Amino acid sequence: MRTTRYMNWAVLVAFVSIGLVLPSSVTAETEGLIDIDYPDVGEAKVEVNLVGGVFSLAAKIMQKEEPEVSEFLAKLEAVKVRVYDKAALGERSFDEALEFYKDQLKRRKWEVLVRVKEEHSKVSVYSLTSGDIISGLVVLVQEPEELVVVNLAGEVDGAKLSQIDKVTGVNLDLAELSFKKRKCKH
């Protein structure tokens, strides 16, 4: 199941690795990007760094079959994903890693959109806004065996976030997460 989720990302990464994408103007200072690499730990189990022209290429490829996904992708500048397992963190805990990301987001004035705590998992969604535009989105998912960090930068249309699961297999439907949050409190 998780393999399928990452398979779609692998196809997009293949475009980058075979040189079908022009050099990117996305830098560390790009609004909406965070320092996604957790310092002084082992290698992430999954590392995705999609930047620049890959999104316009993917948008063109998907335009006929998935026009809404195409429109969503065309406005992105970067998508970065890291998946850490317990072995990669060594002696550090997932909670310590989450604090690293939460502190960074708090210092840079990101807003918490959703927090869901269940018995064996935690999900937090943060946004960075400029006026009415979401310029960055970070999703932190802690499960018993792994920590997933997703960072989207660019013009992120909150109403179309559910479209990203057609590319990634990751459901970012905030309305659904909000419903789960209310349901968990009862």
Image: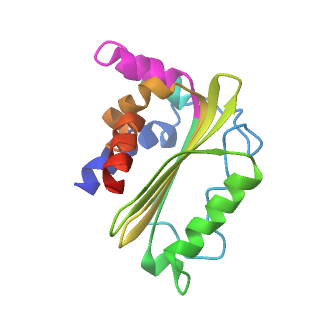
Magenta segment, prevailing SS (helix, strand or loop): helix
Q: Identify the image quadrant of residue 91.
A: bottom right
Could you say which is closer to the camera, residue 180 or residue 17? 180
Quadrant, the C terminus: bottom left
Q: Identify the image quadrant of residue 185.
A: bottom left
Q: How is the image coloured?
A: rainbow
Taking the view exactly as shown, the residue that stands out farthest to the bottom is 91
Task: Please determine whether, in this image, residue 131 is positioned above or below residue 50.
Answer: above
For residue 148, side relative to residue 107 (left or right): left
Task: Please determine whether, in this image, residue 46 is positioned above or below residue 9.
Answer: below
| Residue found at x 71% / y 32% | 25
The spot of residue 8 in percent (x, y) is 33, 41
The spot of residue 157 in percent (x, y) is 52, 24
Quadrant, the N terminus: bottom left
Could you say which is closer to the camera, residue 58 or residue 17? 58
Taking the view exactly as shown, the residue that stands out farthest to the top is 64
For residue 69, side relative to residue 91 (left or right): left
**In the image, which residues are magenta?**
59-77
Residue 149 falls inside the magenta stretch: no
Taking the view exactly as shown, the residue that stands out farthest to the left is 1
In the rendered image, is residue 36 in sight? Answer: yes
| Residue found at x 63% / y 60% | 101
| Residue found at x 67% / y 50% | 34
| Residue found at x 36% / y 20% | 62
For residue 102, side relative to residue 47 (left or right): right
